[in-house]
Image (tube, rainbow, N blue to C red):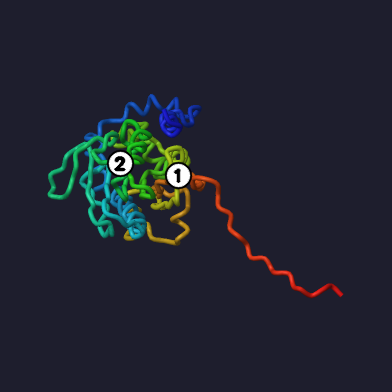
Amino acid sequence: MSRREGTIAALPTVNAGGDQSAMSAWRKVPSAAVSARALQDWFTTPLGAAVLAAERRLLMRQLDECFGYHLLQLSVDDSLTLFDGSRVQRCFRAGPVFRADGQPFIQCDYQSLPFDCDSLDVVIVHHSLEFCVSPHAVLRELHRVLVPHGRLLLMGFNPWSLLGARLRLAADFGRSVAWQRHSLTVPRLRDWLALLGFGCERVEYGFSQLPLHRTARQPAADEGPLWRDYWPLGGIYLLSARKEVAAGIPLKPRWTKGRPRLVALPVAKPTGRAAG
């Protein structure tokens, strides 16, 4: 096994002190189909619609900087199209639940994407890591399919926010299966991505308002000062990462056969004048 493969294989043991107790809870995540239906209903509520609008705003700003030939979207709600206005030539969605809505869609498992290695330029992950069985396995698969220096855009709910606290309470009281999910913080994602060979470029936050339906009905609720996009208490985050490629080892110049040829250097000729 190579050094790189050994590092990736050891990825599930990251943060073993704090994550081992959470692994048993992670196995209780509902199926993708159940989570998708529940999130689909939540995004139609006033609060869910306001959160989705803030997510679209963050994504559109990041997509303006993305170029290439192929863009893949993985979303827990497969009915959403989040790459409108993208400059990438071919954009399509994929997920475990097939949708026949006339738009390009590929039915597949997140942990076994039907794409060649180094074939995708941009991948949008919209809450899919939080609702899959093994988030680190999905990240390994995304690293495989992305081209060198390809962009990865990870969207998630910020556990260290008022919105995250509300969703955690909803999960504790069992109000909806939509919130039986993994609680993925930005520092944890940074650690996983660094081990896999991603370089984190920046993190932006959105939806800093109170997570209430009545306040979410206000128009343009998420618009405000630019510092809010980097305030770590926003309800959602968008982590932008790039697949790094190890620099090649420079090779020593190969000598030609035989002894190296000496090149004569010009030397000043002595004059015939005697020293006086």
- What residue is shown at x 20% (from left), y 46% (from top)? 79
Q: CA distance from mark 2 to mark 1?
A: 16 Å
- Residue 136 position in % (x across, y down): 38, 34
- What residue is shown at x 32% (from left), y 44% (from top)? 118
Callout 2 amino acid: Cys
Left or right, 6 with reference to 92: right
N-terminal-most mark, 2 or 1: 2
Q: Where is 207 relative to 168, above or below?
A: below
Dot 2 corresponds to which residue? 117
> Is disc 2 placed on a helix, strand or loop?
loop
* Front residue of 36 and 251: 251
* Front residue of 187 and 21: 187
- Residue 146 position in % (x across, y down): 33, 45
Query: Looking at the rendering, which quadrant does residue 109 occupy?
Result: top left
Label 2 CA crowd tier, 10 Å (few <14, some 14–19, many 20+):
some
Q: Which quadrant of the figure contains the N terminus?
A: top left
Label 1 CA crowd tier, 10 Å (few <14, some 14–19, many 20+):
few
> Is disc 1 placed on a helix, strand or loop?
loop
* Front residue of 9 and 25: 9
Q: Is residue 250 visible?
A: no
Q: Which mark is residue 61?
A: none
Left or right, 95 with reference to 61: left
The residue sitting at the right extreme is 276
Left or right, 253 with reference to 132: right
Callout 1 amino acid: Ala
Q: Which mark is residue 246?
A: 1
* Front residue of 66 and 144: 144
Q: Which quadrant of the figure contains the C terminus?
A: bottom right
